[in-house]
C-alpha cells in the first residue's frame, strides 16, 4: 500500500517518534511505501512530499518538532483546496492517509473522509490532552514534566525572596497541564479554564498561608483561565487568521492583582513554547511509538474514518466523530484531589 502521513497544527514532543513507529511497522511488516507531506494539509494541497523510510527516520526517536514541518492551513481556506487534495491523492496513488494532529487537523480529516476524498486514520496530538475518546494524547506528559520542573525551581526562588510566584502554562480551553503540574509541584493554588476563579479568594488563600508561617506561594494558571464575571477585568484577546484567540497574559494580570490585594511581592513566569519544544519524555516516546504502530495496523484493517485511541492501558480505535465531538475537560475526581492542597 501507499500511505500518506502529515503532521498538522502546533508542534508537539513526539511527532517524529510517531512517524518512526508508522514507518518501521509499515516497511518491515507490510512492505508499504510511506509518503510524507510537508507542512500539514498545506503540503497535500500543493503536492509537496518527502520520503519517509526506516533510513530517513533513523535517529528521530528523541528529536523534537517534526521532520515534515507543520502548519494550520486547511483545505477550506482556499476555494479549490479540496479539489487540489483529491488531485494529490490521485497523483500519488494513495490508499490512505495517517493524519497526526489535534482537534482542527482531525476535523479536516473527518470531513475529507466523509466526502470520499481520502481514507483516513487519525492520531491524537496535543500537549493540552483535550481530545475526547482517548485517555491520553502524546506530548502531554512531556509538557507536564517541563511545567512541574518549573514549579520546583520557582519554589526555590520564592522561598529565598519571600515572594509569590505565578506560573502561566498552556491550556487554551482545558486545564490538564496546569492541574497536573500544580499537583505534582505542590502549588498553592491552580487556576484552570473549567473553573472560573475569584481573585479575592485566591488572595485570601495566600494571606492565610503566610499567616501560618509559609512565606512563599506558587500559583499555577492555565493561559485560558478566566475570572468569575465581575471579579476581575481582563483584556479580550485578539483572534488570528485561523480563528484562534491569541491567549497569554492572564498570568501577569493575576500576579498584579495578588500583589495589590496581599501586599506580597509577586512575580510571573510564562513558560510558553518551552512546553512544546525539545525531546519527548521516556513515557511519551513509548506512547508515540505505540500510536504509530497501531495506526498503520488500523490502515491494514481498513478501519478508516477513525482515530487510534489509548484506553485502559491499550490501543483501540474510535470514530473521528467521537474524537472531535467535544473537548475533554479535567477529571472532576482528580480536580478534587488537587483542591485538597490549595491554600
Image (cartoon, grey):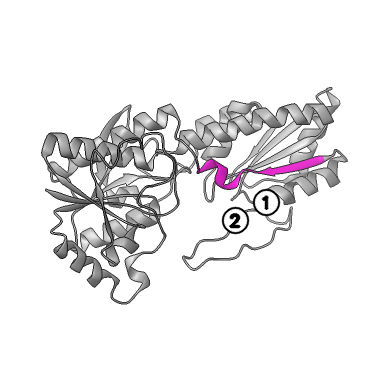
Q: Quadrant of residue 92?
A: bottom left
Q: Is residue 127 magenta?
A: no
Quick one: label 1, few (<14), some, or many (20+) residues within 10 Å? Answer: many
Q: Is residue 315 positioned above or below 272 on the image?
A: above
Residue that mark 1 sits on: 250
Taking the image as shown, residue 106 lies to the left or right of residue 204, namely left
- Residue 127 % position (x, y): 47, 42
Q: Can residue 343 be seen from the camera position used here?
A: no
- Residue 137 % position (x, y): 40, 39
- Residue shown at the point (74%, 37%) measured from the top left: 165
Q: Which mark is residue 247?
A: 2
Q: Quadrant of residue 147?
A: top right
Q: Is residue 18 positioned above or below 49 on the image?
A: above
**Alpha carbon separation for disc pair 2 and 1:** 8 Å
Q: Quadrant of residue 258?
A: top right
Taking the image as shown, residue 231 lies to the left or right of residue 53, namely right
- Residue shown at the point (61%, 48%) measured from the top left: 225
Q: Are marks 2 and 1 in contact (CB under 8 Å)?
A: yes
Secondary structure at numbered mark 1 = helix
Taking the image as shown, residue 310 lies to the left or right of residue 153, namely left
Q: Quadrant of the C terminus?
A: top right
Quick one: label 2, few (<14), some, or many (20+) residues within 10 Å? Answer: some
Query: How many numbered discs, if any?
Result: 2
Q: Which residues are magenta?
A: 266-277
Q: Which mark is residue 202?
A: none
Secondary structure at numbered mark 2 = loop
Q: Which residue occupies the extreme front position in the image?
A: 55
Q: Is residue 289 positioned above or below 39 on the image?
A: above
Taking the image as shown, residue 318 lies to the left or right of residue 302, namely right
- Residue 55 % position (x, y): 25, 39
Amino acid at each position: 500500500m501507499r500511505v500518506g502521513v502529515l503532521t498538522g497544527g502546533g508542534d508537539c514532543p513526539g511527532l517524529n517518534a510517531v512517524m518512526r513507529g508508522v514507518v518501521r511497522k509499515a516497511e518491515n511488516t507490510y512492505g508499504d511505501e510511506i509518503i510524507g507531506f510537508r507542512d500539514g494539509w498545506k503540503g497535500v494541497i500543493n503536492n509537496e512530499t518527502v520520503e519517509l523510510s526506516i533510513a530517513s527516520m533513523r535517529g528521530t526517536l528523541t528529536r523534537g518538532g517534526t521532520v515534515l514541518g507543520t502548519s494550520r492551513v486547511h483545505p477550506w481556506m482556499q476555494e479549490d483546496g479540496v479539489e487540489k487534495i483529491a488531485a494529490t491523492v490521485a497523483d500519488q496513488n494513495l490508499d490512505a492517509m495517517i493524519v497526526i494532529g489535534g482537534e482542527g487537523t482531525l476535523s479536516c480529516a473527518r470531513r475529507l473522509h466523509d466526502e470520499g476524498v481520502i481514507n483516513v486514520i487519525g492520531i491524537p496530538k496535543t500537549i493540552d490532552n483535550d481530545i475526547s475518546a482517548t485517555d491520553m494524547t502524546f506530548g502531554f506528559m512531556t509538557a507536564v514534566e517541563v511545567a512541574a520542573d518549573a514549579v520546583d525551581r520557582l519554589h526555590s526562588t520564592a522561598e529565598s525572596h519571600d515572594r509569590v510566584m505565578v506560573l502561566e502554562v498552556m491550556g487554551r480551553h482545558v486545564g490538564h497541564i496546569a492541574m497536573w503540574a500544580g499537583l505534582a509541584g505542590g502549588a498553592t493554588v491552580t487556576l484552570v479554564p473549567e473553573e472560573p476563579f475569584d481573585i479575592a479568594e485566591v488572595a485570601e488563600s495566600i494571606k492565610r498561608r503566610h499567616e501560618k508561617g509559609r512565606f512563599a506561594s506558587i500559583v499555577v494558571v492555565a493561559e485560558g483561565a478566566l475570572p468569575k464575571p465581575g471579579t476581575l477585568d481582563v483584556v479580550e484577546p485578539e483572534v488570528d487568521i485561523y480563528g484562534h484567540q491569541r491567549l497569554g497574559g492572564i498570568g501577569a494580570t493575576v500576579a498584579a492583582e495578588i500583589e495589590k490585594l496581599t501586599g506580597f511581592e509577586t512575580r510571573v513566569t510564562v513558560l510558553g513554547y518551552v512546553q512544546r519544544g525539545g525531546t519527548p519524555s521516556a513515557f511519551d516516546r513509548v506512547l508515540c511509538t505505540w500510536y504509530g504502530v497501531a495506526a498503520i495496523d488500523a490502515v491494514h484493517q481498513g478501519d478508516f474514518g477513525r482515530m487510534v485511541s489509548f484506553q485502559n492501558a491499550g490501543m483501540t480505535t474510535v470514530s473521528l466523530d467521537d474524537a472531535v465531538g467535544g473537548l475533554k475537560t479535567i477529571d472532576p475526581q482528580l480536580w478534587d484531589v488537587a483542591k485538597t492542597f490549595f491554600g
